[in-house]
Image (cartoon, rainbow, N blue to C red):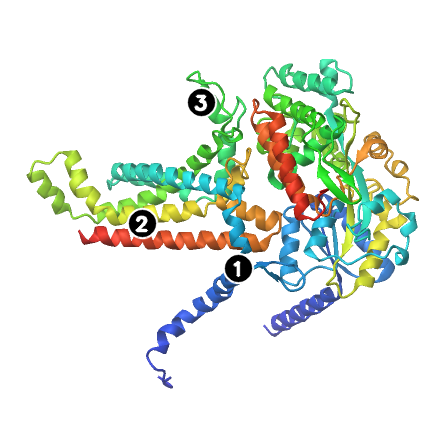
């Protein structure tokens, strides 16, 4: 009995010690999930080995910004936040970011300038450090395509025809009409419609906004944008998109591709690893986005690391980020030789050769797309509300096969301009 | 007894209530008060909030998206209350027997009421999957009806979600009606039978008047539930397609947690709260008036 009590006391003391140690660790929140857990553990283990600084890591893939807002409102923010670089505007509006001084940042020169640009605030200063870049390309079921005798789609027409064939010509050969062509996550939730259609808008030669000296005006009411939206809608109205596309988020859409219900999916390099497992690496291929009337532009995004204004250890936080973008940090983040999704998709460090590390054709396609036709969202102060109003509007158009696209786009134009005005950056 | 604690009698009930009161104060009353304060501010996440007076409330009265959501919510409440009420009443009449097989059916019918909404929503998404192979579409195909879009069709989505609400609440309401039915004095039925009343006459003159308290509870609960509906919509359609299932709470959620506009979201929440209180007061006064007859 006494022994048992002693043991308990020791355990209690141990956990107390552990808690004290945790409190001194650098608190880091990242918008990743379990797929990236292994690689993050490796990155942090190496950082701790080099510096002796412990890291208390919190991962959340869903509702990340909401959790962050709650933490901010409760005065309980982490020291470092890693999230999409596009979020910089919203985090700035929330007032939780501290400025990054490029001159005092070790290894700043090794980071590509175009990547640095993704963390600029509207005042021209940096509020984050890019740690990874990527552009979107298209996953295709290679076995289906070859079974039906099609070449890789290179144009919109090819893409539409392939989607038709995947839907109507029984690509899996089971004699049932149980497959679909294009997987489209076009729910308005969190702005997915706008995020997904952005590629088509650029491929058609359209644009979200025009810029003049840091001020903007919506340019969605154009023929090019109408062409893009109409092309997107044609998949849904012809029945070549997965059912329920109109209310699907990526969470709903990804399993449709991986489980073999549909054969074409526009996504980022982060899906290379999971899709290689299911449906399987020999069944899929990554192709450059099929070109529209104006080319094959697609969304470029990146992740960035931010230091919060409330951090009591900003120097330590900066040390951690300096490690993330260093050569060894980037290599580790790319999950070299690991069974894990990478946190670094395309390296932002000039001294790391992404292709040499990957040695994989799929990655080469993503890298090529990023270098040649990657396109960032416009750098308005806060993109998120604009993404939401455009998504609400586009979703309305996609939901009704007979609606007047031009009139609907004019209404979205107005809504975007109203939001730009609210952000004090509307061209008057 | 070893010792006797002397406390004045009025303290005793408060002592018993204290644990619950402390928990409620901490987790309910203080957050509610904070919410009310927030509705007069533009909430900043770091540093002091900015006082904006009644701006947030004024904005609510000119917000088109919110007005559309209010319209959908009213439709949701009215249809689910009326149809859900009638169905629950019919089921209760059919199942008020004490036989064993009836008890089994009653239990089976009650299952949706005790299942998590997230699971019900997933079942709904499976049943109403808009492909021709979907469960509902396969069923209507037997009668030659073409495949429908269900929750992917802007004109049908709201009604499919309302159907979920009805499916979920009918068992609850049924139990309330069953309790009400059990409380009706059997002698009234006997007296009516002696007077030669038909089944319909008994229903009209004995059952329905006897069930007024039950109806009142069912309607009130259904209204309160309906105006605050969130999970059912968020987990099935997320407010889409084309914003046609957006209700007040999903709109508040979007404003608060996606646009992170806490002040405005709090203001709209406060208006919804005030409306619910008003509704309750009106309901109670109507009920009291009926009770006097």
Which of the two discs, 1 and 3, labels the residue nearer the N terminus?
Answer: 1
The crowd level at tag 1 (other Cα within 10 Å; few <14, some 14-19, many 20+) is: some
- Left or right: residue A129 versus residue B205 is right
Measured Cα–Cα span from mark 3 to mark 2:
36 Å
Q: Position of residue A159 (x, y in %)?
A: 72, 20
Q: Position of residue A54 (x, y in %)?
A: 78, 61
Question: Which residue lies under the disc numbered 2?
Answer: B217
- Residue occupying image coordinates x 51% and y 42%: B118
Tell me if I can see residue A171 in this picture.
no
Element type at mark 3? helix
Q: Quadrant of residue A77?
A: bottom right
Q: Is residue A273 visible?
A: yes
Residue B217 against residue B18 in the figure, above or below: above
Residue that mark 1 sits on: B35
Q: Mark 2 to mark 1: distance in Å?
A: 29 Å
Depicted A105 relative to depicted B162: above or below: below
| Chain on which label 3 sits | B
Q: Chain of mark 1?
A: B
Asked if labels 2 and 3 touch by Cβ distance under 8 angstroms, the answer is no
Indicate whether A41 appears above or below B1.
Answer: above
Q: Is residue B254 left or right of residue B70?
A: right
Q: Nearer the viewer, mark 3 or mark 2?
A: 2
Identified at 20% across, 45% down, the residue is B209
Image quarter of the N terminus of chain A: bottom right
- A156 and A2: which is toward the camera: A156
Measured as percent of width and height from the top left, residue B166 is found at: 39, 38
Distance, label 1 to label 3, CA atoms, is 47 Å
Where is mark 3, residue-wise? Answer: B139
Quadrant occupied by the C terminus of chain A: top right
Q: Residue at x 12, y 45 (%)?
A: B188
């Amino acid at each position: 009995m006494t022994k048992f009590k002693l043991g308990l006391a020791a355990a209690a003391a141990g956990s107390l010690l552990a808690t004290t140690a945790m409190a001194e660790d650098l608190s880091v929140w990242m918008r990743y999930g379990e797929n990236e857990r292994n690689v993050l553990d490796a990155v942090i283990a190496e950082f701790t080995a080099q510096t002796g600084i412990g890291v208390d890591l919190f991962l959340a893939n869903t509702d990340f910004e909401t959790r962050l807002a709650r933490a901010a409102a409760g005065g309980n923010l982490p020291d470092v936040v890693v999230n999409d670089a596009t979020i910089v505007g919203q985090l700035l509006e929330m007032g939780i970011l501290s400025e990054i001084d490029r001159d005092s940042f070790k290894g700043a020169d090794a980071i590509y300038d175009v990547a640095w640009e993704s963390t600029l605030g509207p005042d021209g200063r940096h509020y984050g450090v890019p740690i990874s870049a990527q552009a979107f390309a298209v996953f295709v079921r290679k076995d289906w395509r070859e079974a039906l005798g099609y070449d890789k789609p290179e144009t919109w027409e090819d893409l539409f025809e392939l989607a038709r064939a995947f839907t109507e010509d029984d690509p899996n050969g089971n004699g049932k009409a149980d497959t679909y062509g294009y997987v489209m996550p076009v729910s308005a939730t969190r702005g997915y419609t706008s995020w997904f259609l952005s590629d088509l808008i650029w491929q058609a030669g359209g644009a979200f906004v025009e810029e003049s000296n840091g001020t903007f005006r919506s340019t969605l009411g154009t023929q090019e944008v109408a062409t893009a939206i109409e092309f997107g809608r044609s998949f849904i109205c012809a029945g070549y998109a997965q059912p329920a596309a109109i209310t699907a988020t990526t969470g709903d859409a990804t399993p449709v591709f991986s489980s073999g219900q549909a054969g074409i999916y526009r996504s980022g390099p982060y899906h290379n690893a999971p899709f290689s497992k299911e449906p399987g690496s020999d069944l899929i291929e990554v192709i450059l986005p099929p070109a529209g009337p104006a080319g094959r532009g697609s969304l470029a995004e990146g992740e960035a690391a931010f230091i919060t204004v409330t951090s009591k250890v900003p120097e330590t936080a900066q040390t951690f980020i300096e490690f993330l973008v260093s050569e060894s940090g980037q290599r580790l983040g790319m999950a070299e030789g690991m069974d894990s999704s990478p946190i670094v998709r395309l390296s932002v460090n000039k001294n790391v050769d992404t292709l040499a590390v990957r040695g994989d054709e799929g990655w080469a396609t993503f890298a090529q797309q990023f270098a040649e036709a990657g396109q960032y969202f416009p750098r308005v102060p806060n993109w998120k509300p604009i993404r939401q109003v455009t998504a609400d509007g586009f979703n309305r158009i996609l939901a009704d096969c007979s609606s007047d696209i031009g009139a609907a786009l004019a209404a979205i134009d107005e809504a975007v301009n109203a939001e730009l005005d609210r952000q004090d950056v509307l061209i008057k | 007894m070893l010792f006797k604690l002397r406390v004045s009698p009025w303290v005793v009930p408060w002592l018993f209530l204290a644990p619950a009161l402390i928990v409620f104060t901490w987790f309910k009353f203080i957050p509610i008060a904070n919410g009310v304060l927030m509705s007069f501010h533009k909430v900043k996440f770091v540093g002091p909030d900015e006082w904006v007076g009644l701006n947030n409330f004024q904005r609510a009265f000119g917000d088109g998206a919110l007005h559309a959501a209010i319209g959908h919510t009213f439709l949701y409440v009215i249809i689910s209350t009326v149809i859900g009420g009638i169905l629950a009443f019919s089921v209760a009449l059919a199942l008020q027997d004490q036989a064993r097989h009836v008890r089994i059916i009653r239990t089976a019918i009650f299952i949706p009421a005790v299942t998590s909404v997230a699971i019900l929503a997933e079942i709904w998404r499976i049943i109403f999957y808009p492909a021709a192979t979907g469960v509902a579409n396969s069923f209507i195909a037997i009668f030659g009806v073409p495949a429908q879009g269900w929750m992917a069709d802007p004109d049908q989505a709201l009604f499919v979600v309302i159907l979920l609400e009805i499916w979920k609440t009918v068992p609850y309401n049924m139990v309330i009606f069953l309790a009400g039915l059990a409380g009706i004095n059997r002698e009234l039925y006997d007296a009516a039978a002696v007077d030669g009343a038909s089944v319909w006459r008994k229903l009209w003159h004995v059952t329905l008047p006897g069930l007024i308290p039950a109806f009142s509870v069912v309607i009130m609960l259904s209204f309160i539930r309906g105006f605050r509906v969130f999970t059912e919509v968020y987990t099935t359609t997320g407010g889409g397609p084309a914003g046609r299932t957006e209700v007040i709470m999903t709109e508040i959620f979007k404003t608060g947690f996606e646009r992170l506009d806490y002040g405005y979201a709090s203001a709209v929440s406060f208006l919804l709260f005030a409306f619910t209180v008003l509704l309750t007061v009106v309901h109670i006064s109507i009920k009291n008036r009926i009770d006097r007859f």
